[in-house]
Image (cartoon, helix red, strand yellow):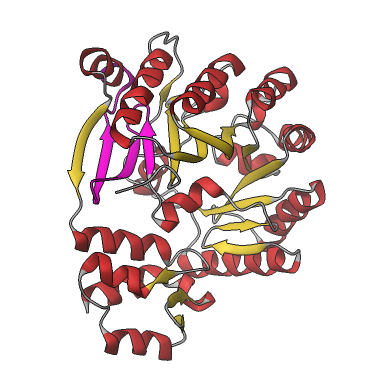
Amino acid sequence: MPQINDPLAVYIHWPYCARICPYCDFNVYKRKADDALLPAILSDLKHWRELTGPRTISSIHFGGGTPSLMTPAQVSQVIDIVAELWTFYAPEIALEANPHEMNAEDWRGYRAAGLTRLSLGLQSFHDPALKFLGRDHDGTTAQAALDMALDIFPSVSTDLIFGWAGQTLDMLSDDLTRILDAGTQHISTYQLTIEDGTAFAKAEDRGQSRAVDADQSADLYDHVCAILKAAGFEHYEVSNFAKPSHRSKHNLAYWQGIDYVGVGPGAHGRVTLGNKRQATIAHLTPGGYTRAVTETGSGIDSCDTLTGADWATEYLLMGLRIDEGISLTRYRNLSGKDLDRDELNALIGDGLLRRVDDRLCATSNGRLLLNAVTERLLLA
């Protein structure tokens, strides 16, 4: 049974966007006036406190959507109620923002409300790339937003997309150089993938290429890794690089299997209640979510108890993404059995996994083939 000192992360999903990007398949909606959503989120948090009992908050993350469409007063209300409901001891508090929505007054208001980290959806400094990706900012705005963020917040993370059709190593190098020269402490790099139902997927169906092929993407990824490691960044997760002490505490909660509550339309959660791992999903639409909270006090749409095998699978899939890997003892305790010894030794022999005492980690080559590696482990 979780104790008061056991960490708990809180995810707040703000689903509205000024514009929906052509590659995005998140649960997002075109921005509109909605006076009911914030009160519903605050009420839902109270219900979560009843479920979890007293816990210590390790992080709060405002994601979306575009949570920077929230006012500082709205963000402050959420932070204040989380602090009121649970134990609050110097948690990481982060919010995602877009460059074109930069506003010094709002961003300083977020900082005054308690934000310790801003995650900036920069993606690129190249105007043709930003136009291609359907972004609402240009390179000049991206640079100004990054400089402003670094001036206001103690920790700044930038998102960078690679693998878009037409991208070259020189373009990628230029983007990375400008991010590094600004003094950014954390960089999340995402390979452009074509998700079903997106505008990019429809373009691909029409024969209009939107992403590079797998070999080109691998070359770009290797280039990113080499540059950022040389610049002193820790490659602590497949897609994430950080200066020392600037790793994302909130994302580590996902990768390490720490409990987190998900609040807001479509938000997912994983919470251990009575030694059972519960997988929750909130009602998908803003209207459905607010109605559910009004009528029942909770925004949860589905709540499933994971079997030991399911819990162990999640632990392995997420844990092998980070440099510390997984505990083989914990995997065995969750699943009730060890990983197949022959397959494990074969993957270690192939240079894809590394074992040090009780820890199992993916090597650099293993990270490139992580889906295949985990499939071999789980199907053996």
Residue visible at 70% across and 55% down in the picture: 171
Can you say whether 273 is above or below 135 in the image? below
Along the line of sight, the residue nearer the viewer: 25 or 214: 25
All told, the count of numbered labels is: 0
What residue is rendered at 52% in x and 27% in y?
A: 67
* Residue 196, quarter of picture: top left
222 and 207: which one is in front? Answer: 222
Res 128 quadrant in image: top right
* 4 or 188, nearer to the observer: 4
Regarding residue 137, the answer to whether it shows in the image is yes
Question: Relative to the observer, which residue lies in front, 231 or 328?
Answer: 328
In the rendered structure, does residue 276 fall within the stretch colored magenta? yes
Q: Quadrant location of the C terminus?
A: bottom left
Taking the image as shown, residue 185 lies to the left or right of residue 77, namely right
Residue drawn at (68%, 25%) of the image: 102
Q: Image check: 292 left or right of 371?
A: left
Q: Position of residue 110 (x, y in %)?
A: 65, 24
Q: State the image coordinates of residue 302 (x, y, percent, origin top left).
A: 20, 35
**Whole-percent x, y for residue 360 in the image:** 43, 76
| Residue 302 is inside the magenta segment | no
Q: Residue at x 34, y 61 (%)?
A: 315
In the drawing, does residue 349 fall left or right of residue 136? Answer: left
Is 4 placed above or below 84 here? Answer: below
Residue 1 at what x, y percent from top left? Answer: 29, 49
Q: Which residues are magenta?
A: 260-288
